[in-house]
Image (cartoon, helix red, strand yellow):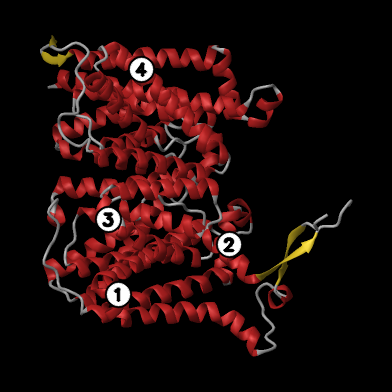
Amino acid sequence: MIVSILIYGLVNSVILILTALGFSLTLGLSRVANFAHGGIYVSSGLVAWLLLRRVGLPYPLALLLTVLISGLLGALIYRLILIRVRGIELSEVIATFAVGVAILEFFRWLGFVTYEFNLPSFIPGRVDIAGVLIDYQRLFIIGVGLVLALLLWFFSHHTKIGLALRGIAQDEYTALTLGIESDWAATLSVALGSSLTAVAAVTILPLGIISINTGYDVLLIALAVAVVGGLESTVGLVVAGIVLGYAMVITSNFVGPQWMMVVYLVAIVLVLAIRPSGILGQFKELEERV
Amino acid sequence: MAATYRKERLDRGIKARSDDIFALASYRDLAYLLLPRLLLIGGLLLVPLLEGVLGLYWLNVILIACTIALLALSWDLLASVGLISLGHSLFFGVGSYIAGALNYSLGWSPLLTLPVAMVAGALICTLLIYPILRLRGIYFALITLALPLLFMRVIEATKILGGTEGLSSLSPLPGQPLVLYIVLAAVLVCFFGYRRLIDSDYGLVLRAINDNDRSVMASGINIYHYKAQAVFIAALPATFAGAFLTHHYRIVGMPAFSLEYSILPLTSVIVGGQGSFAGALLGALLLVPVSESLRAFGTLRVVLYSVMLVIFTVGLPEGIFPYIRRKYHQFERPVPVEEGS
């Protein structure tokens, strides 16, 4: 029982971290709250499905193309829509939210609502770890999560582009004087966030079916993790993912699986009431929010 | 060489004298100010009498348009305080469920459930939102988006209040002309009430919180109290709309918390123009009939709202109403452009 909670809690935590990563990265790097996150997540899954089942591409190629297409979609959303309302936060929110809803409901209208829409696991089968059966896909999720987190940390702290992007997030005008073009940086950050979301989608979605409503859940998860962890803080994201992931698995085991989503609300309310800047947020962020 | 002309805009005299105190010199001035308002009131009150022309179906559409207008007005008031809600169906759903539960389990008549659901629902919503009032901008929007979704989950999980089935066979409201008059009266009271409220000193504080909350705090005003009061006032018409539609449809279920009741008022306000309430009203009265005629397209309607939302936020952020108002308050005349200057 305890081992099972430990292992599945870890898997769940990594799932949460992965789902929130794209959203949180874009927010942290360019201050764009991409509310189309859920739409991109689900559309990535469906694009992968289309490439795989309708076009008939080999699985790895389909996944790669999906990630690229989603990145392109993110860049397009920025260049066509967001660039015109940049800086007006609420217009950004409303516009991206509308884009997300439009994507999701469009797919619903096209009829992507049945059980046939699922992605195959990377490698089928399961393995026995300390008496707990776990399928390879869940192990893959943990692996992808770890690799991505490390890569991202390296990218944002030790590469020129990453540092430029963080510079924009800290102080746009100063960054401009140093020759960092904020529009391209923001385009890049939205595209990168969308690609990451696509990676998360194709890694996580083989666990179940691709349902349109997942899109709204994913946005909720991203928001819960971002609020609990404190924004812009990668470590906060990981900590929040782990806390929420284990809280969910424990709730599901001892209270009932239908209560899992309620954990988010409780977590958000508690964090906001006790420490509005999140677990690892800094004072600057507190000022931004309160 | 043909003379080129440019458009010159001039404020109408009565408007130019003062922005809010009007010196009325003649019946023409009086009519200038009263006409739009009387047109609105008269037009709305005439609608139920047109049953022969419009038919019951379109009367029903207008009724739904009015409930959406109530939601849109409520959204507009919240936005005037700087609280942007992406989950307005929270208010709608809470109102619906209170009215439904009171009627279903206690058998109260709609005469009693409507006011109780309105006030109690608004109180509950205010208590729910109170902890997140410290947030502003996108963080507030994020959480409000989450709240109705989570309510759906809780109802689904606990199976309280009828669970996924909902509560059905509730008491009906009276017949068609009367029921439409009730909601029209509600819209008019809410509209003119809000306009008066936002122009009062109290409303000045609310708008100041939107403009610069730090300086309001620095003036020794507790902005959280004001925000909480604003949420309560804004929740009243929305919960009423929920309770009203519950009794009209005689059923309440989880769709009360659905995205449609969040995105329709939002689109109405953005299309009509934020800040004047008239825009919200106009938007709702335009959008709902349009969306009804698109009912055959199913969920594609939501896509259309969203696309419209994007187009208006990006391309025409001020909305339709400010444009109309400018046309009404200003002369336009062609003036020849002087050459060589």
Q: Residue at x 35, y 53 (%)?
A: B262
Name the residue tied to disc 3. Answer: B295
Q: CA distance from mark 1 to mark 4?
A: 53 Å
* Drawn side of residue A240 relative to residue B204, left or right: left
- Classify 10 Å Cα crowding around label 1: few (below 14), some (14-19), many (20 and above): few
- Classify 10 Å Cα crowding around label 3: few (below 14), some (14-19), many (20 and above): few
* Drawn side of residue A17 relative to residue B309, left or right: left
On residue B323, the disc is 2
Q: Callout 3, which amino acid?
A: Arg
Q: Mark 3, chain letter? A: B
Q: Is residue B234 above or below residue A173?
A: below
Name the residue tied to disc 4. Answer: A65
**Discs 4, 3: same chain:** no
Q: Mark 2, chain letter? A: B
- Classify 10 Å Cα crowding around label 4: few (below 14), some (14-19), many (20 and above): some
Q: Mark 4, chain letter? A: A
Horizontal and vertical percent for residue B214?
A: 61, 51
Q: Helix, strand or loop at disc 1?
A: helix
Q: Callout 1, which amino acid?
A: Leu
- Classify 10 Å Cα crowding around label 2: few (below 14), some (14-19), many (20 and above): few
* Labelled pair 2, 1 in contact (Cβ < 8 Å): no
- Marks 4, 3: nearer the viewer: 3
Horizontal and vertical percent for residue B5?
A: 76, 59
Residue B286 can be seen, yes or no = yes
The quadrant where residue A18 appears: top left
Q: Helix, strand or loop at disc 4?
A: helix
* Labelled pair 2, 4 in contact (Cβ < 8 Å): no
Q: CA distance from mark 1 to mark 3?
A: 18 Å
